[in-house]
Amino acid sequence: MNAAAPIGIFDSGYGGLTVFKAISDRLPAYSYIYLGDNARSPYGDHSFDTIYKYTLECVEWLFAQGCELVILACNTASAKALRTIQQKDLPKKYLNRRVLGVIRPTAEVIGNFTRTNKVGVMGTRGTINSQSYLLEIKKFFPHIKVFQQSCPMWVPLIENNEHLLPGADFFIQVYCEQLLLQSGDIDCVLLACTHYPLLMPKLKHAFPDYIKILSQGEIVADSLSDYLERHPELENRLSKGGEKQFYTSGDPKTFDEHASIFFGAVLRSKSM
Ligand code: DGL
C-alpha cells in the first residue's frame, strides 16, 4: 500500500468543504487532502475552457501529492470539466487514477425524494447552462420533470460571508420565487452547488414547508462508500491514516477564517 495516497477533494473555493465534512464523517479511516482554488473562484461564470483548465491544473496538483482518487466536490467543475478529464486526460496520462464528480451520484437518487415528480435544481450559471442535471436525471428517472434556476449572486454572497445578513434576503427570495413560478408542483429542490447548504436557514423560510430541500454531502458520501466497496483494487491503494490536510491557492489565513463555517470545525490550511 502506498503510505501517502490520500483521497483528494477539490472545489473552486470553500463549498466543497460541506461535501468533505460529510465524506470524512462517513469514511473517517481514510486520509484526505482538500484543495480550494480560492485565488480563482468563483468558477460559476467562467467559460467551459477556463473551468476545464483550472480544474485540470488542480486535479494534477492533487495527483502530484499522491492522490489516486480525486472527488470534484464542485458542481460547476463536475458539469464542465469532469467528462473531458475522465475521457481524455486520464487515459492519456493517468491510467490508474480516478476522478469522480457530484452530479451523477445526485441524479441517481433524486427520484427517491419527490412524489410529484417535479424537481427544482438551483445552481451556478455554469452548472445550469451545461444542462448536466437535465441530462443525468433523465437517464435514471425519465418521468421526472426538472425545473432549473441559476442563482449567480449566491456564491459571491457566501464566499464573502454576507449570506446571513438581512441584505442577502432579496437575492435569496428572488431566485426561489423565480423557481416556483416555473411550476407550483415542485416538491423537492436540489441545492446543486456545494456552497448553498450554508443558506439552509434562509431557504427554509423562503420555501413552503412541504418542499424538501436537498443538499449533496450525504448523497456523495454514500456514493463514495459504495464506489470504494466496488473497487477494491483502488481502495487497497488508499492510505488510511485518518489525516486531513487543507490547501488553498489563495491566502491561508483568509481561508482559515472562512472555512470553519463550511466545515463545522476550526482548521489550518497551507498554500498549495
Ligand atoms: N461550489 C461550487 C459548485 O458546486 C461553486 C462554484 C463557483 O465557484 O461558482 O458549483
Image (tube, grey):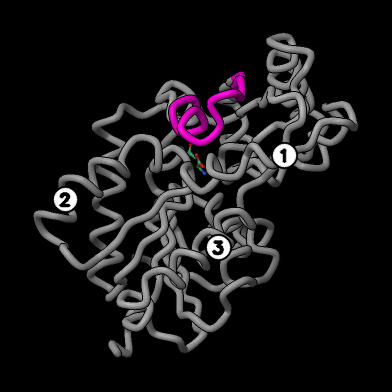
Nearest the eye: 170 or 25: 25
Report the magenta residues as a range.
134-147
Seen in the picture, residue 100 relative to 62 is either above or below; the reply is: above
Give the mark nearest the N terminus, 3 or 2.
3
Q: What's the residue at 47%, 69% (across, down)?
A: 246
Seen in the picture, residue 4 relative to 7 is either above or below; the reply is: below
Q: Which residue is mark 1?
A: 113
Dot in front, 3 or 2: 2
- Is residue 93 left or right of 218 when viewed as pictured? left
Seen in the picture, residue 266 relative to 12 is either above or below; the reply is: below
Label 1 CB-ligand 1 distance < 8 A: no
Q: What's the residue at 44%, 23% (across, down)?
A: 131
Q: What's the residue at 70%, 31% (across, down)?
A: 189
Amino acid identity at mark 1: Phe
Q: Which residue is mark 2?
A: 89
Amino acid identity at mark 3: Phe
- Quadrant in the picture for the N terminus: bottom left
Dot in front, 3 or 1: 1
SS at circle 1: helix
Amino acid identity at mark 2: Asp
Q: Which residue is mark 3?
A: 20
- Quadrant in the picture for the C terminus: bottom left
Give the mark nearest the N terminus, 3 or 1.
3
Query: Whole-Å distance between the Cαs marked 3 and 1?
Result: 23 Å
